[in-house]
Image (cartoon, rainbow, N blue to C red):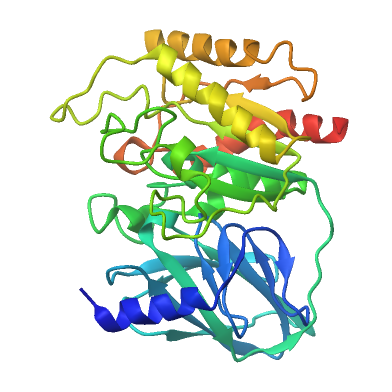
Amino acid sequence: MFPKKIALLISFLLISIISNSQTLNSDKTFLYQGRIEKLKNDNVILIGTASSVSFNFTGNECSISLQSVDAYEHHNYVSLVLDGKYIGKIRIEKGAVQAFPVKVTSNQKEHRLEIYKNTEAHTGGVLFAGTTAKLTSISFKKKKKIEFIGDSITCGAASDGSDIPCDKGEYYDHHNSYYAYGPTLSREIGADYLMSCVSGIGMYRNWNDENKDEVIMPDAYPNLYLTKDASKPKYDFAFQPDIISIALGTNDFSGGDGKKERLPFNPEKYVSNYINFIKMLYEHNPKVQIVITNSPMVGGERGVVFEDCLNKVKNAFANDKAHKPIQIFKFKPMNPSGCTGHPDVADHKILADEYAPFLKKLLNEK
């Protein structure tokens, strides 16, 4: 479709070094976090929701070079945090690498810029191709770590209509991963985080697919790009979180769009897939604490069935002495105020405030 662009992407991937944890480059000038793919010359593809690159620099301005990279050309977004202050989203138009100026407003001698992928893995990667900044060394403090596995709610999808109204633009125009509940609560309790989430995805079926045409989370998760594309690199499980939070079920319980065939919810299949998914996570994270959650969007009779399924998943590991007992967290019901029936940024703060004390207590017990 776009042979030059695809050729460029392939050349990047051939020389890449796969990485998806908190890492520093060789001379300690860039800090990478999340699902990313490191390339040569300190270039990196930000893949997953809220994946990031950070650096320290001196001076009162710099520019950063970014490109939206996918099998087809379209725009993408990152969020910027300068000296600990969120300064907004940048829209990266389709096409070649673009330079974006960043101006400093504080009088600090040294500054830190954090660049977060604002959108999801399925919207393509964001290539960080360098900066003009006068770089200084960067380091990170060892913190407790949480991984958030989920769907569009976890991703912060459709949560922000401040720049483009909900009834305008593309689905990903309304994403804001930085203010999703997982990153928000992690900042509040001083934890590092990894986001492994995909809009519309489920544990045994997706929002509008009976696991016929689209990948479900148990199949997508081991792929670095959260896809079923076998040509993409595998995820290396290097993050090794203290807690894995799993929030999957909203789409399994969904009725779909009402046009495509939708079978009745299958609790046996949901529970079976959930149990096998947890077993896979334990294989790679033997010391982890698993937390499984309900959904603030699933209530009534469906909510009762949902909680029963979660209890069955937990009980399946009741005699497991090799791992920490599985915990269940229940979000309160919510009438969301975001786009297309999703929580908005304010709603995510509510979810974060609900969940943070629970996770903080678990981290303090470790």
User: Which residue appears farthest toward the right when viewing the image?
Assistant: 365
- Residue occupying image coordinates x 37% and y 47%: 158
Q: Quadrant of residue 285?
A: top right
User: Horizontal and vertical percent for residue 60?
Assistant: 67, 89
The quarter in which the N terminus is drawn is: bottom left
Is residue 113 at all visible to an observer of this figure? no
Question: Residue 274: x and y, percent?
Answer: 52, 24
Vertical comparison of 162 with 281: above or below = below
Q: Is residue 347 found left or right of 147 in the rendered image?
A: left
Give the x, y percent position of residue 303.
44, 13
Q: Please identify the residue farthest to the left as the structure is shown.
A: 259
Q: Position of residue 66 (x, y in %)?
A: 47, 79
Which sits in the foreground, 99 or 260?
Answer: 260
Q: Is residue 168 above or below residue 125?
A: above
Q: Can you tell which quarter of the image residue 302 is in?
A: top left
Q: Viewed as shown, does residue 94 lie left or right of 241?
A: left
Q: Residue at x 69, y 43 (%)?
A: 146
If the image is split into quadrants, where does the C terminus sit? top right
In the rendered image, the vertical position of residue 76 relative to residue 297, given as above or below: below
Residues 111 and 119: in front is 119
Is 45 on the left-hand or right-hand side of 1? right
Q: Nearer the viewer, residue 178 or 240?
A: 240
Visible in this render: residue 107?
yes
Residue at the image position 26 percent from the left and 23 percent from the top: 255
